Amino acid sequence: MSFNVGMIPYTNMEPFRLLGPPSGGVFVPCLPRESIAALKKGQIVAAAVPVGGLEELDGVVETLGRFGISAGRESMSVLFFARCRFSEFKRPLTLFLTRESASSVRLLYLLFRHTAGRDKIPRVTENPDKADGRLLIGDQALRWRIRFEQHGQVEGMTEMVDLAVLWRRYYRLPFVFARWVVRKDASRKVRKSLYNWLEQFKVREKELVAAAAYPSARRLGMSEKMMHKYFRTLRRCLTESDLQGQNLFMEKIKALGKGPYFQSVTEMDTRRLAAACHGTSNSERSI
């Protein structure tokens, strides 16, 4: 028996990598968005898949217990950087979106609907250098966070917002970014191996998280203390509150219908960008 398990190549998954693959399994690097297509095609049997992609996988996979990635209050690695306060970020300002995410983009859209309103949601530009805001996730977000905390800005962005914090503020629930799933046509032997693996992780989680902190911090140029905080911030064995947060997010996304959610920027918008954010550099870092 040999089967492929999708593994997100981000630091937040390092405790799972340290445990090693389940019996008979092989880790295959998959960015969050890529894991959805890989599961549909049968290239992998299991993965920690973005919750934003679960609807697309309906009928293809089922969840593996209560395992995933959740942020109770802050994520520290799903961040929006901007030249203006988040509460002031609306059309004609533009943003650049990470292409790696299937949940964070949808989450950002919901948050903009809350603050800017449906008719003022900023548009997307394909040019990151001209964008007034950037959505980053994973290790790239952590690296920008380090630079931001050191210098008070990064790449001209003077504001940093953690999307999980905003979700918690508006909806009073944690945000679940990913769930471990397995294809429904997986054999009983494969399922048993995956369940045993995740249960073993649950027992050894504290040990694995502690072991992952130093090498992860060194690789990213973070302090070990900050890396310990990052690993403690995330939950991998989900609670009832986490599941409530996931259900609420799924309900809201379902109500929106199928994407695309954000619209692309037009030439008229581009000509108005220079003056749109002038004089709005107050920090909202605590959000």
Image (spheres, grey):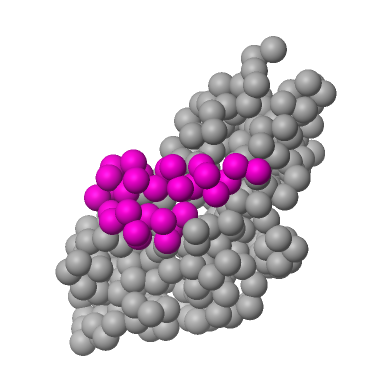
Magenta segment, prevailing SS (helix, strand or loop)? helix
Can residue 119 be seen here? The reply is: no
The structure residue drawn at horizontal position 61% and vertical position 68%, both measured from the top left corner, is 174
User: As drawn, which residue projects farthest toward the right?
Assistant: 188
Residue 100 coordinates in the image, percent (x, y): 45, 46
Comparing 197 with 250, the one in front is 197
Residue 167 coordinates in the image, percent (x, y): 56, 72
In the picture, measured across the screen, residue 276 lies left or right of residue 138, that is: left
Residue 122 coordinates in the image, percent (x, y): 42, 71
Residue 241 found in image quarter:
bottom right
Residue 40 found in image quarter:
top right
Residue 210 is covered by the magenta coloring: yes
99, above or below 176, in the image: above
Can residue 74 be seen here? The reply is: yes
89, above or below 225, in the image: below
Q: Which residues are magenta?
A: 203-231
Residue 177 coordinates in the image, percent (x, y): 57, 55
The structure residue drawn at horizontal position 30% and vertical position 74%, both measured from the top left corner, is 159
The structure residue drawn at horizontal position 56% and vertical position 21%, both measured from the top left corner, is 26
Q: Quadrant of the C terminus?
A: bottom left
Q: Quadrant of the N terminus?
A: top right
Comparing 286 with 52, the one in front is 286
